[in-house]
Image (tube, coloured by chain):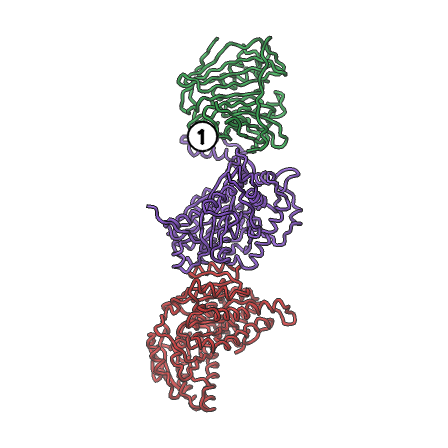
Chain colours: A purple, B red, C green
Amino acid sequence: MAAPTRKAAIVGGNRIPFARSNGAYARASNQDMLTATLDGLVARFGLQGQQVGEVVAGAVLKHARDFNLTRESVLGSRLSAATPAYDVQQACGTGLEAAVLVANKIALGQIESGIAGGTDTTSDAPVAVNEDLRRVLMELNRAKTVQQRLKALAGLRPGQLAPEIPRNAEPRTGLAMGDHAAITAREWEIGREEQDELTVRSHQALAAAYDRGFFDDLVTPFLGLSRDANLRPDTSVEKLAKLKPVFGQGEGATMTAGNSTPLTDGASAVLLASDEWAAERDLPVLAHLVDAQTAAVDYVHGGEGLLMAPAYAVPVLLERNGLTLQDFDFYEVHEAFASTVLATLKAWESPAFCKEKLGLDAPLGSIDRSKLNVNGSSLAAGHPFAATGGRIVATLAKLLHEAGPGKRGLISICAAGGQGVVAILES
Amino acid sequence: MSDWYRDFANSGVGTTITKQLGLPRPAVLRRHEPGQPLLPGPAVVGSAGEGRLRDELTRLLRDAGVTVVSPATVDGGTDGDRLAAVLLDATGLTGPADLAAAHDFLAPAVKRLAPSGRVLVLADPPADAASPAQAAARQALDGLVRSLAKELRGGATANLVQVPLGAEASLAGPVRFFLSGRAAYVDGQVLTVTAADVPAGEDRERPLTGKVAVVTGAARGIGAAIAKVLSRDGAHVVAVDVPAAGEQLAQVANEIGGTAVALDITGADAGTRLAQQLIARHGGVDVVVHNAGITRDKLLVNMDAARWNSVMAVNLQAQLDITQALLDTEGALKPGARVISVSSQSGIAGNRGQTNYAASKAGIIGMVRAWAPEFARRGATINAVAPGFIVTEMTAKMPLGTREVGSRLNSLQQGGLPVDVAETIAFLAQPGSAGVNGQVVRVCGQSVLGA
Amino acid sequence: MARTVLDAAPAMPALFARAALTARGRGGDLPDTRLARVGVTADPAQLADYARVCRFPLSDALPLTFPHVLAFPLQVALMTDRAFPLALPGLVHVRNRIEADRPIGVGEALDLEVWAERFATHRSGATVDLCASVSAGGAEVWRSRSTYLARGASAPEGAPASDVDVEVGALERPAAQWRVPDDAGRRYAKVSGDVNPIHLSGLTAKAFGFKRAIAHGMWVKARALAALSGRLPDAVAVDVAFRKPLFLPSTVTLSTEEAGGGWDLAVRNATAGTEHLIGTVRPT
């Protein structure tokens, strides 16, 4: 029997300020950050000792010991220990995908409330033993006789002591995400200046939002940090123009440390619920998660940019909901790189792309830039991979709530592996 | 933050040494523990003149399980338990001559007062007196109680409650407070009650059950202690502090099962935002504790505008604005609401280097008194609490000499604890304190400053 | 035609040693010899190691290039025989074509047969094709042709012109970038048995006229095919030309482009663009 579905409400969110890699959270683990984030959410909504339907979160860079990261964080938090939890991972889409999963279970009536989140640290990242050493050790572990052990140990070499530091590179292409983005930027002819302008806008918008107290009920300070460490309210196009490109090659290289997101540590969480659950507890409903869509592109052999999948996901979502790209009051396009945002917007404006790649008769068209990332995004806040989705969902939900009923927002997040997660929120 | 000197003076060898050297011997104060009886021993109720409260006081004590002994037994007797409390009904005073009876009752009774004992005198306000002689007699009690408080040792306190004719129904709550361990650091004070509708059937253990209390500056120190005590007394606490203190605020809220709200109370729309949230999330608020405060000390001649303005904005203007916003927003203040402002001894006595701080804290007293009639009309109350030397993280950073001198300059010869301030605030928040309005209760151990 | 069936794969280090010792004094036409083994199955441990080094997923089917590893020792034995006209040291692998009619299961018993043919004239010497045929259950399922160039050698009178070129498209967009470490040759040697000294270390490579060790052509081919795992036709011909040597260590790019129902490939130096391998993958 198909149960009637309902739309999941976004009650609110919490995150810790995002820190630059090896900064304020250098000694904090993913579990530390996720636990603190959950506790901040619990404090904000008076959930001490309460059991929510499910907590769903994840991390992109994860230690072997964190196999049950979310559940362990729940056990360390003030939530009822009877709250179930599971981990998800969809690269930079983790946080939004977690919210979609929770929302879907709420929509189906399987749970009444849930918390979606994500955490990532590049400071406390898992460092693996050298792959050869690992094989020797595994062989040793399997050995049953002295001879087998000696044979396994004979495989040891001094060079194997060098640990393997995880690289921010696509396994199948060996290219850093930035290198991929640089290829896309070149293909879409995204200029340096427009990237720097977008970056400055992000910083200024985030700083202004902090100044007007927008994040007072979205952020809980952690380890002495009360604002995102990457935030530079005083940055300018002139200052950014001085930076040397770090991705791409030659004359056409436009992507700098300024208009790319830095490695970041942080965590976020969003409280979702049925309207009834929220009403019973006098909790607010900021917005509803209306629908979501994922897409993936063949960035290895298919000739599409690694971070272009949202460009494919959005038209599917629009079509299903009978909307046009212009039918939104706010757009939250994750700023993995300034060029990524601009290339995505350009793709939607391109008749050729929309016809050939998306199979549309007419381009999706352009958006009103004044509605884009109005409170800043990842360029300013930083981007702790799995935590970005939760940051964006909570930010957009509050924006929609402030704007009043009937407002609509679009979230677009690109992810490693050529994936994209997009969603619609409505107040 | 332990009181090393008090602990030493109460240790075996410390007792001998401090006695022989004639050093002050601060007592370990009796403080409230949930489940504790009102008094740890018997009480005696006496009167000076034909008072109207003696029967009522006796009944109140017996209701609380206290053994009430007769003044005759006390007089000259040396056997039996020492007295946990001595209550004098002085509502029958007609002139100074009647005070002799007060002396006759108090002298032998106080002699048998137990450590952390309570002397509580109840009288009519001098202003309501029918004659100058009666006013003189009533006012004389003020001097008597304040002096006796200074004479008492072993953590005992003496306080005076003024009960106008017709306000008798307001008496029980304040009497219970002064006798209890909640008032451990309230000494030498005069509290005036007024006639009010006091709801019956209060849960003595958890008098704030079902109430919603908002506490500003709740992330640490006295604010955190207030949040915890209000929560212990049954309230759901909405803990407010600046966004930057969010981490500690969340910890406090989580510890007491409350709600954390990060809010800069000096923001233009802070009051409205708070009011809206209290209505939406909690259906309004019963208890508002204005605790948030900052210091920016400098001698007046060296004080820049920023120091002056920031202290005034946080300590005084924000209290005015938020209170006004709560009054103006329909449904924000629930019926019988309680507003309690944290003032300071500095606001009463003044303090070198604190012109800004003392001004703001004195201003609070003016605000509370001015608002009291309007609150009374709403069936609500507004009061101030003025802490003296309270041992906090802040005082722990003071130089040892300053801290030791500061903490001993009072009748109890020790600093108070944040919980002492919190207990007084919790008392003012109780439904039973409906008749306490426009008052300033000092929690200072009868400090010599500004007394 | 002489057909010799061997009971086991010949020991490769000994073959290479013999080849070095008997390099001089060779000549004449190709021998009419065929070497064979019957009922050969892949060693699962070797297969796993091979898959890891070449980045193939480990599955129930042999990697497309794996039968070459089984047949290669026989080819080396053929080439090191005194009857073989060209000296093995100095032979350069310039082209390799593999045709598979269907995927081969890991546990299948395979019959291998190798021979040499097409002694041909090349502008800088002579080429010879080493062929391999793999059958299962009596039917041929896989065959390969490796063309080796002997610089300065000459083919017999009337020999055909050698055919070492493969045509591919422009292949402008790199699909992947590989860092090829300096021990890539040793790693592949260990899993393939191809212990040709030019791949093992700088020192041994210098002895044979290379400035540094060079990567095995068959490893480059294998890795390129591994990158297309899941996108290859079951019946397929993979034809690659090995161009400039891939010196170790190097960073190279792989470019892929759909063509003719399959793929065109190129592996080039990431900075200089030097072409190491170009090839085609076509359904058959």
Check disc 1 and report its element: helix, strand or loop. loop
Q: Residue at x 62, y 16 (%)?
A: C151
Q: Position of residue A324 (x, y in %)?
A: 50, 47
Q: Nearer the viewer, residue B3 or A40?
A: A40
Quarter of the image for residue C47 reads top left
Residue in view at x 44 percent, y 32 percent: A139
Which subunit holds the residue at mark 1? C
Badge 1 crowding class, 10 Å Cα cut-off, few under 14, some 14 to 19, many 20 or more, is some
**In the picture provided, is A170 more to the left or to the right than C137?**
right
Q: State the residue in front, B413 or B164.
A: B164
Q: Which residue is mark 1?
A: C58
Q: Is residue B87 above or below residue A213?
A: below
| Image point (48%, 48%), residue name | A323
Q: Amino acid at mark 1?
A: Leu
Residue A9 vs C256, above or below: the answer is: below
Q: Position of residue C249 (x, y in %)?
A: 59, 30
- State whether residue A118 is above or below residue B404: above
Where is residue C37? Give x, y as percent. Answer: 44, 16
Residue B224 spot, x, y in % from top left: 47, 64
